[in-house]
C-alpha cells in the first residue's frame, strides 16, 4: 500500500514540472511580442517584474507554478507520514482526490482564471488535504510503540 500512497505525490511532482515547462513558451512568447522599451530597465529581471508588462494571461501559468510550491508541500509531508505508518484505502483515495483537484485547479487558473471557480477548487482540495492530515495525525498519535523495533 506504500507505493499506492506515494503514486499521487509522484504525479503531482511531474505535474509541477509540466507547469514549469509550460512557462517557457508562454512567457518568452509574450516577451517576444513586446517593444523592448516596455521591459524594466534593470539587470536581473525576475518574473514578478513582468507583472503589468506582459499580458496578464502570460503570467497565469507562473502564478500557478508558484501555487504548486505552496500548499502541496504539506501534501508531500502528509503522504510520506502515511506511507511510513501504513496507509489505508481511504488515505490513497484522498491523496488522489487532492492531486486531481490540484491539476484541475492548475488548468483552470492557467487557461480561464475565473476566481470563484478557482476558489471552489482550492477549497475542495484543501478539504481533502485537511482530511488526509487529520488521518496522518491519528495514525501517528495512535501508533502502538510496542510494535516498533527496539
Image (cartoon, rainbow, N blue to C red):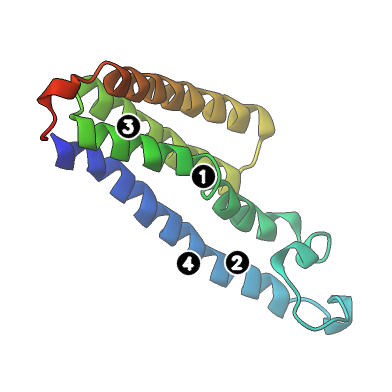
Note whether 116 is above or below 77 in the view shown.
above
Query: Which label belongs to residue 106?
Result: 1
SS assignment at label 3 = helix
- Kindly identify which numbered label has been placed on residue 26: 2
Frontmost of labels 3 and 4 is 3
* Foreground residue among 2 and 112: 2
Residue designated by label 3:
95
**In the rendered structure, which disc, 4 or 2, sits on the residue that comes first in sequence?**
4
Tell me: 142 left or right of 17.
left
In this view of the protein, can residue 15 be seen by the observer? yes
For label 4, the residue is: 21
Label 3 with label 2: CB-CB less than 8 Å:
no
Q: Nearer the viewer, residue 25 or 144?
A: 144
Mark 2: secondary structure: helix
The quadrant the N terminus occupies is top left
Q: Residues within 10 Å of mark 2 (few under 14, many from 20)?
A: some
The image quadrant of residue 148 is top left
Q: Is the residue marked by circle 3 packed among few (<14), some (14-19), or many (20+) residues within 10 Å? A: many
Amino acid at each position: 500500500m506504500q507505493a499506492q500512497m506515494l503514486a499521487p505525490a509522484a504525479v503531482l511532482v511531474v505535474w509541477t514540472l509540466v507547469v514549469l515547462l509550460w512557462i517557457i513558451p508562454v512567457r518568452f512568447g509574450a516577451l517576444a511580442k513586446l517593444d523592448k522599451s516596455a521591459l524594466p530597465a534593470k539587470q536581473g529581471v525576475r518574473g514578478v517584474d513582468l507583472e503589468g508588462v506582459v499580458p496578464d494571461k502570460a503570467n497565469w501559468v507562473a502564478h500557478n507554478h508558484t501555487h504548486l510550491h505552496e500548499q502541496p508541500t504539506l501534501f508531500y509531508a502528509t503522504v510520506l507520514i502515511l506511507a511510513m505508518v501504513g496507509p489505508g484505502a481511504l488515505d490513497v483515495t484522498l491523496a488522489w482526490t487532492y492531486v486531481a483537484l490540484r491539476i484541475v485547479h492548475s488548468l483552470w487558473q492557467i487557461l480561464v482564471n475565473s476566481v470563484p471557480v478557482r476558489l471552489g477548487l482550492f477549497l475542495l482540495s484543501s478539504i481533502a488535504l485537511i482530511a488526509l492530515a487529520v488521518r496522518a495525525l491519528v495514525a501517528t498519535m495512535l501508533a502502538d510503540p510496542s510494535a516498533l523495533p527496539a
